Amino acid sequence: MRNNISHSGVIESIEDGCIHVRIIQTSACAACKVAGYCNAAESKEKLIDIYSADTKAYSIGQSVTVMASRQVAANALLLGFGIPFIILVGVLVVVLMLTHNEAWAALGGLIALVPYYGVLYLMRERLRDKLSFWIE
């Protein structure tokens, strides 16, 4: 079992210490031979930022392979979806038990996410170092 996730991409632009790579993320259906005849197939273009001190070794339009470890992917999913889900459901249940009002519970759950995402935003520099991609 591989420990890394990889995507092929093309370098879109290069800035000071940052390489922007455009990848095409495809679902399993999009790779199927009959995907053109099926409505389930989908693919999305994504722009990935790769922070590297060695940007001179790359050029715009160059094909590269972008890599991330499975641990990085798991941590990103946990921070982006897992913890917010737990906060949302926890606050929803507590407010519903206290007020017996579903509207207030829903509003309280959504409002509770604002400080969480605010903290993530303030910690974006530190998270960028821990949740990073690299070019193979």
Image: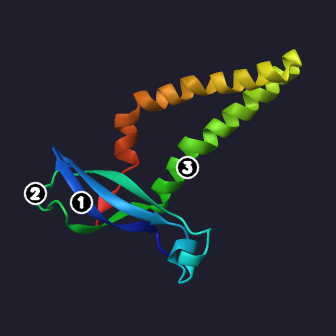
Q: Quadrant of residue 84?
A: top right
Give the residue pinned by disc 2.
56
Q: Nearer the viewer, residue 95 or 26?
A: 26
What amino acid type should be assigned to the residue bearing mark 1? Ile
Q: Could you tell me how far apart the alpha carbons at marks 2 and 3 are, in whole angstroms?
A: 32 Å
Image side of residue 54 versus residue 95, left or right: left
The image quadrant where one finds the C terminus is bottom left
Q: Residue 77: which numbered mark, if any?
A: 3
Q: Could you tell me how far apart the alpha carbons at marks 2 and 1 are, in whole angstroms?
A: 13 Å
Task: Pick out the residue farthest to the left.
Answer: 56
- Report helix, strand or loop for mark 2: loop
Colour scheme of the rendered structure: rainbow
Q: Could you tell me which residue is drawn at 27 percent across and 68 percent down?
A: 64
- Report helix, strand or loop for mark 3: helix
Q: Nearer the viewer, residue 85 or 69?
A: 85
Between marks 2 and 1 in the image, the one whose residue lies nearer the viewer: 1
Image side of residue 90 versus residue 130, left or right: right
Q: Could you tell me how far apart the alpha carbons at marks 1 and 3 are, in whole angstroms?
A: 25 Å
Q: Could you tell me which residue is drawn at 43 percent across and 61 percent down?
A: 69
